[in-house]
Image (cartoon, rainbow, N blue to C red):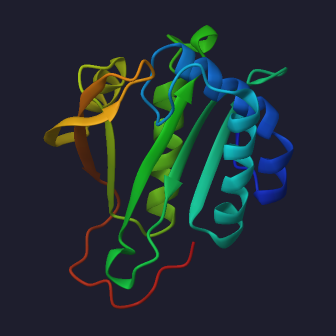
Amino acid sequence: MIVTRPDAARLEAVSEELADLLIDTVDGGASVGFLAPLDRAAAVAWWKERAAAVATGHLAVWTAHDGSRTVGTVTLAFPDKPNSRHRAELVKLMVHRDARGQGLGRRLLAVAERAAVAAGVTLLHLDTETDSPAERLYRTAGWTVAGVIPDYAANPSGVLRPTTLYYKYVGARTESVASPLTR
């Protein structure tokens, strides 16, 4: 597997492949913000819309390729507020159903965590559907449960489900965020 970090133009160029991955993820039952069946045009448009945030540095996206297609992705969302530049949100960690069970999710998670440290981030957070397969990955990767919110989001079938919030300290913690970080 090759993992790359596309710039905004490249993200738009691979939006069709990322749309296929997103559709597979939703069809597989993962709660990543969309209802099934996910329209392909809507999935492509959603990925293309991310390009602007990549260009400004508010999002960093990594994609994993098996040679012929995109089989995984992970994103870090960086806040734009001065008091929160020490943290980032891990979003949209997805692995195609055909590529699961090979450690790709763990590898993408590690790539994002290392990149967060390199960007000066010391605290990561995420949310995931409670009792989902993703929870095992986060717990075994050292993430800490912060709490559970009932009826937080609908799963792809439209049923309201609880979500579990996680956090993880990465890098060197400091008591001050006075100077803005560069990404």
Residue 90 in the image: x percent, y percent? 43, 48
Q: Is residue 1 above or below residue 74?
A: above
Tell me where residue 69 sits by quadrant. Answer: top right
- 25 left or right of 81 in image: right
The residue positioned 81% from the left and 49% from the top of the image is 12
The picture places residue 107, in percent across and down from the top left corner, at 52, 31
Is residue 126 something that shows in the picture? yes
Q: Is residue 2 visible?
A: no
Observer-nearest residue: 108 or 82? 82
The C terminus sits in image quarter? bottom right
Residue 33 rendering spot, x and y as whole percentages: 47, 37
Residue drawn at x 26%, y 27% is 161
Direction from residue 160 to residue 81 in the image, left or right: right
Residue at 57% over, 12% down: 97
Residue most toward the left?
Answer: 147
Number of marks in the image? 0
Residue at the extreme bottom of the image, as rendered = 178
Q: Is residue 116 above or below residue 1?
A: below
In the image: residue 73, left or right of residue 178? right
In the image, is residue 162 above or below residue 86? above
Q: Quadrant of residue 122?
A: bottom left
Q: Can you say whether 7 is above or below 133 in the image?
A: below
Viewport quadrant of the N terminus? top right
Residue occupying the point 72% across, 57% down? 51
Image check: 125 left or right of 88?
left
Residue 159 screen position, x and y as percent:
32, 22
